[in-house]
Amino acid sequence: MPLFFLPGNTEYGYTKTIYTLVFVSGLLALWGAEALLRREWRLELTRLWPLLPALLAVALASLAGGTPACVVLQSAALILYFGLVYFLIVGAARGDREVVLLLSALLAAGVLAGLYGLLQYLGVMRGGPGEGLSARISTMGNRNYLGGFLAYLLFPCLILLCRPRRPWARGLALMGVGFTLAMALFVQQAGVRLGLLLGSLVLAFGLGLWPCSPIWRRDWPWWAATGATLLAPLLVILGPGPGAVALASLAIVGGGLYGIGRLLRRVRWAWVPVLLSALVALVLLLPPTTPIGAVREAWERNAGRVRAWDWWVGYEMWKDHPLTGIGLGGYKISFVPYKADFLATPQGAAYQFPILRAAQAHNEYVQVAAELGILGVLVLLGGIGFSVYLLVRRLSTQEDPDKRLELLLLGAGLATVLLHAGVSFPWHLPASSLAFVTGLALAFSLRYGPCGGFPVRLRGAGLKAAVLLAVSLGLAASVVGVRDLLGDRYLLAGQNALYLGEVPRARELLQRAVAMDFCPRHSLYWLGIAQLQSGDLRAAQATFRRCLSRYRPEPLYINLASVDAELGEYQEARTLLEELLATRPNRDTELGARYLLAVIDLKDGGDYVSAERRLKEILKLDPRFERALILLGDIARNTYRYDEAKNYYRQALGVIEREISRLERELSRPVTPEEYGGIRADLLRLSQEREKVQEILAQLP
């Protein structure tokens, strides 16, 4: 799954999601068939089993927040399926062989994904837009997604250096782990590096509390080689100076935590002052309020203010629906209107810069609070706390130092994910979720002892019913998933047809996309665009209105308002545009909204004074906004100010000629279909405007 993507679809993570639904359904069917042959289905649920039904329950409770049921059900199905992956791995990992196979597969996927990203960076393979870092999308779609996935599997895959007894297998694992670390650092994402740092510190603390000294004495050459392999990327990628400083700092802090761990092992009550000190340090180092200049500077440099904006918007959502949230999957739908609510608060006054709609909160804990409310936060934090408690119990009772070290490495990997979840959204990415669930399942697998005393054995009629239920669930999920995947391919084909100006064909393709999709969102919006371009205003209006509760980007406001204005529904158009302007959109969107308001002023009562005032405000922001110049010329002509009208029209003509020349130069280089579509549409509009202005100038007295 981490390596799977389809170029004919719109987004890499989307295809991985469908792949997961289909493949896990197949695994369930095979598991059920095996149980039928054995006439018994044995399930190891572990003490964590209540977490899955609790998450599904709070997901269904979040329907009270108003998010469409199909959106909530789609997200809940993914929670269920990754829960099934957890149970599959818990039941399968019973010995060394299974653990080695699972982790080898994960490491192989990480190495191949990292290698693909490196080849894209070097220009050997086709990558993302631009060059250098931006090209490293690998099979993930984003270099941050790639870095996160590699960071999450790093510590668990160190287990491969303990298990294989053949030197060549250990050597391969060592090279794979070293390359994985190098690529995780190479993506240059602060959150990824911070997660790796926390994982290292957790490991250092754990080694002090649960010593594994016999392993170091037994295999010291391998561990010396491992240390050198892991230190080399730090020095090479960070540079000799910064790398040495980072290593020294890590050694000092890690050594201190190791010593604290040893102290806690001897003095049981010492955890109280240690915990209190850690909480105080955490409060002092919180980026928005930290008194430490270096931390604040790093926070600002790494898009901290944008992240904080996303979190404040999530807080506004939570305030409206504190108990059950706005609905699972609803953050991206409600972001734009809630952004306006936040900007109207005293806190929002400090954020005087535009920001585009965010699909995720870039903080899983904030997003859970926004979408699932207090109930969701309690389930999530309770699940994390209970998992930590059970893992500590397992470590404390584990007498085998090899297994103790493996559990510590799995815990360090989980800590990496939990920290990175505070500045990113790993649980919304299929490959990252897979790495997290694999580590969690291995930590509670039979390999390291009893799973918690919740084995379930099904026989006879119960077995047949369970297998039938599993197969039916998998078949239904697979059919829906594959239909969605086909609908997404129709969506991409329809978008490309629109970019090429083939509007009738695009409309047909997008109608198919909407019909195939279980919960149409993006396809619905683009169908509205096709209907608008074909002149079917009533159909476009109805489609855009359906979009308001499912997919609500800034362009939707502009398009729906323009349709409302054309159909004479001026108040609805004004409401949409005023809400859009309250969100402080980017400059182009703001100018388009202000221009539409001026047009509505003219159409709804002929308010020349208000329209002229709005248009002159637009020109203060952008003197090259030719549509404002043309409309000002129209106003001056209609009020018999012919010299003023000529001046506006000539200014507009000059802007239009320069813009057409620039766009024609743009077409002389290779462009994407999306870029071509935008340039083609702009050229068509500008050519029509030039023809209109020239005709008016020829007729003016």
Image (cartoon, rainbow, N blue to C red):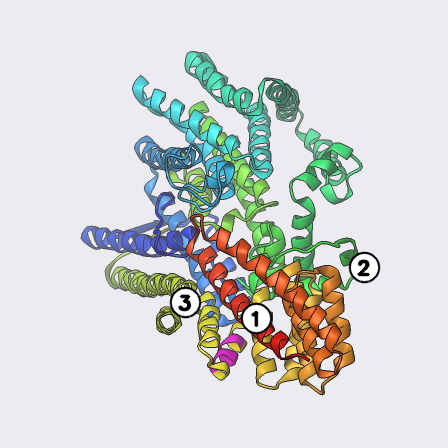
Could you tell which of marks 1 and 2 lies nearer the N-terminus?
A: 2
- Count of numbered circles on the image: 3
In the image, 412: left or right of 93?
Answer: right
Residue 633: name its quadrant: bottom right
Look at discs 3 and 1 and give the one toward the viewer. Answer: 1
Task: Give amino acid for label 3.
Answer: Gly
71 or 199: which is nearer to us? Answer: 71
Quarter containing the C terminus = bottom right
Q: Residue at x 55, y 66 (%)?
A: 686
The Cα atoms of the two marked residues, 1 and 2, are separated by: 43 Å
Left-right relation of 580 to 16: right
Q: Looking at the image, which residue is at 52% across and 80% down? A: 541
Asked which secondary structure carries label 2, the reply is loop
Q: Position of residue 627 (x, y in %)?
A: 63, 69
> Does dot 1 land on a helix, a strand or a loop?
helix
- Residue 540 belongs to the span the image colors magenta: yes
Please identify, in this view, whether the residue under mark 3 or under mark 2 is nearer the observer: 3
Residue reaching furthest left?
37
Specify start and end residues of the magenta stretch as a single range.
539-544
Residue 120 place in picture, x, y as percent: 41, 37
Query: Residue 346 bears which disc, if any?
Result: 2
The earlier-in-sequence mark between 3 and 2 is 2
The residue under label 3 is 501
Q: Which residue is mark 1?
A: 689
**Circle 3: element type:** loop
**Mark 1, mark 2: which one is toward the viewer?**
1
Q: CB under 8 Å between callouts 1 and 2? A: no
Q: Position of residue 46 (x, y in %)?
A: 43, 47
Q: Could you tell me which residue is drawn at 39 percent across and 38 percent down?
A: 113
Would you say 348 lies left or right of 196 here? Answer: right
Badge 2 amino acid? Pro
At label 1, counting other C-alpha atoms closer than 10 Å, the crowd grade (few under 14, some 14-19, many 20 or more) is some
